[in-house]
Image (spheres, rainbow, N blue to C red):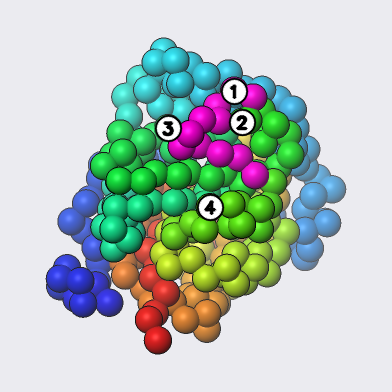
Amino acid sequence: MAARYGMGIKRLADYFRGPAPAPAPRGVAFAGDYASWAAAERECTGYSSSVILERTCASLLKVKHGEAVYERDSVLFDRPEYAFPAISGLLRAALLSGGRLSVVDVGGSLGSTYFQLRRFLRAATVLEWSVVEQAAHVQCGREHFEDHELRFYETIDECVARHQPNVLLLSGVLQCLPDPYGALADFLRHRPRHVIVDRTPFLASDRDRLTVQTVPEWIYPATYPAWFLSETKFAGMFAEAGYEIVADFDGADTVSLPDESSYFKGFIYERAEP
């Protein structure tokens, strides 16, 4: 597919190689090998803790008002960290759609990726960025961040009905869902032409493993379940749904599993034409 559009290579990301992978934030750790989501969840505070939303909102308001340049997981940075493989996939999608870029960003917080990449994305003729999130995030997003480009929805069905997005972005979200493969199948049933997957962890042993992720208090005090996935099973779902891989790339995250080799990875997919 890449050659079809003149790239001549599979690993599109090699042309947009960003900085060397950044280490995981100090103190973030993954541990355990749980038999079920319920078993892992019993040992966690969860994703819906109000402190996560409060700290993320406060940080992103500083980005919005020009007091900081970049936010990730509520942490502010004084210099941007650009996800160039994702940028290349987004701009490629816009180019193949006559300049239109309509993104559904599942699990996109309060628009963190939008604010990180917007200076590049405004090269698109039409730009729509829709975040699908938990109800509390949607309420906060609509109150403090929503505008003519950025919108917030509680379900992907609601978003698709309003915007007909041509890009599905799954960045750091599949591992946070109770049933990542079931959720992926549900997302792909909407048949977006382009899918970009980023910040997703896999096991070198090519199996699924459910862990508990611990976030240190200097970010926000939280623990929650987190999957490490089988890349073979993951790729098979895209192939079965009729998608071809345009590029894959190394993730910018590192992991700290104490007893098993793992890695983060990203992908750019395109739905195969009949």
Which label belongs to residue 115? 3
**Helix, strand or loop at mark 3:** helix
Give, as a single range, the part of the protein colored magenta: 143-153
Q: Secondary structure at mark 1?
A: helix
Count of numbered tags: 4
Q: Determine the CA span between mark 1 and mark 4.
A: 21 Å
- Work out how far the residue at label 2 is from the one at label 3, CA to CA, in angstroms: 13 Å
Q: Tag 2: residue type?
A: Gly
Which x, y percent locates residue 140?
Answer: 66, 28
Spot the residue most to the bottom. Answer: 274
State which mark lies toward you, 2 or 4: 4
Q: Quadrant of residue 219?
A: top right
**Contact between labelled residues 2 and 1, with CB atoms less than 8 Å apart:** yes
Residue 143: image x %, image y %?
64, 24
Marks 2,3: beta carbons within 8 A: no
Query: Mark 3 vs mark 1: which is more N-terminal?
Result: 3
Mark sitting on residue 154: none
Q: Earlier in the sequence, mark 1 or mark 4?
A: 1
**Residue assigned mark 2:** 141
Q: Is residue 215 left or right of residue 201?
A: right
Residue at mark 2 to residue at mark 4: CA–CA distance: 18 Å
Disc number lying in front (3 or 1): 1
